[in-house]
Image (tube, helix red, strand yellow):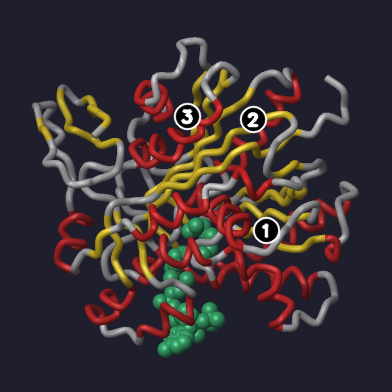
Amino acid sequence: MPADVAIGIHDLSVATSHYVLPHQTLAAQNGSAVDKYHRGIGQHSMSVPAIDEDIVTMAAEAAAPIVARHGVERIRTIAFATETSVDQAKAAGIHVHSLLDLPSATRIVELKQACYGGTAALQFAMGLVRRDSSQQVLVIASDVSKYDLDSPGEATQGAAAVAMLVSAEPALVRLEDPSGLFAADVMDFWRPNYRSTALVDGYASIAAYLQAVEGVWKDYTKQGGRALDEFSAFCYHQPFTKMAHKAHRHLLQQCGHDAEEDEVTRAVEHTTAYNAVMGNSYTASMYVGLADLLDNADDLSDQAIGFFSYGAGSVAEFFAGTVVPGYQSHLRRETHRAAISRRRNIDYARYREIHEHSFPVDGGDHPLPRETVGPYRLAGLSGHKRIYTPQ
Ligand code: CAA
């Protein structure tokens, strides 16, 4: 394949959950000032999956329109990133492959490194397309962020899936070499196999994230990357949207800039609206930010975007992409807005019930009542197997 063939994101689709819990409701319950959430961490509501939704149903909903638009012929790989896996052995992408009726000649794998997994999947996809530019890779990042009730992390929960079609001559964003990389063995956020909620050292996690911003930028510069002032916007991983502001301020300071608030806001402002109402979607979060930017910023044709992907624990990567002229006619703006506005408000009591819910582990037949109005659902459990169906 000629070295100058562009590879990148050809299509991008976001899905989220059936329910939404406004931070107003959480604040009224726990006595916090709602401004702590709205202004302090930059979150207004959180997506909450119904009992019959999970990473698979959201992923299938995100991926279905991509398959409908582009067909299945060139998709030979599904790379599924998540840190809220539904099985220790089987890749969640196999359920999606089945729900979407994809050909049997498909390579399917699940990738994990906290919130960095989506970027690992994207880089894996880039390598496969570089090897054979006639192939396309379906990259999916899908997560449900869950912390203990009444913990500081609770307000940063959320859920979403992003599906991206990676191909040669992409219609949306051409991705570039080099990448800046950083890894450090830290226990800032983790989830042992026996827990459904994450453990986190909140302030240490923010410090580890900022250390990774420094680390990737140093390496990106060393590898011959672009200068800071070449970028029009920055998509950061957003555990809460104010983190993008903190991160960019830190990067500017690292580069010897004054970090004026206006400059920070300009760099990230169009990447935070979807995340502010969906909450943290871990592996999907940075790509939800990209969807928001493409859907809602003024024309970005030929402009460079910086991507900072962070996965606690930790691994981080910084890379650049250039927006392809004509990209606006390939966006899914209306579908994304509809997915957000379709969500139903739940009251605190129901949210708590869902949070505390766990499935029986006896291997019996457990059909689930129909709750979600999304196109796919978890219909039940039987013989320790999860049964997924279209609506
Ligand atoms: N009006 C306006 N602002 C207010 C306010 C009010 N009434 N009350 C508080 N604030 C501000 C505070 O000043 C603070 O702002 P700064 O960060 O700018 O100082 C902000 O609101 C948050 O307040 P606190 O620090 O008091 O909040 P907290 O102690 O309850 O917890 C948190 C904050 C540590 C981020 C917590 O939400 C948490 O643990 N979150 C989960 C972990 C996390 O998201 N870490 C991020 C990096 S790790 C990562 O990126 C991986 C991942 O996805 C998890």
Of marks 1 and 2, the one in the foreground: 2
Q: Position of residue 127 (x, y in %)?
A: 71, 27
Q: Is residue 188 left or right of residue 170?
A: left
Quarter of the picture containing the C terminus is top left
- Identify the secondary structure beneath mark 2: helix
Q: Is residue 201 visible?
A: no
Image coordinates of residue 124 in percent, x first then y, are 65, 30
Say which residue label 1 marks: 212
Mark toward the start of the polypeptide (3 vs 1):
3
**Closer to the eye: label 3 or 2:** 3
Horizontal side of 234 relative to 75 (left or right) equals: right
Relative to 247, does residue 287 appear above or below in the rendering?
A: above
Residue at coordinates 78% horizontally, 75% vertically from top-left?
Answer: 253
Q: Is mark 1 within 8 Å of ligand 1?
A: no
In percent of width and height, residue 217 lies at: 78, 58
Alpha-carbon neighbours of circle 2 within 10 Å: few (<14), some, or many (≥20)? many
How far apart are labels 1 and 2 at the CA level? 24 Å
Q: Quadrant of residue 139?
A: top right
On whether ligand 1 comes within 8 Å of the CB at mark 2, the answer is no
Q: Residue at x 52, y 26 (%)?
A: 78
Mark 3: amino acid: Ala
The amino acid type found where label 1 is placed reads Ala
**Mark 3 = which residue?**
68
Please rate how many residues cluster around mark 3, counting C-alpha atoms within 10 Å: few if below 14, some from 14 to 19, many from 20.
Answer: few
Q: Is residue 295 visible?
A: yes
Q: From the image, state whether disc 3 or disc 1 is nearer to you.
A: 3
* Vertical relation: 136 (above or below) 268: above
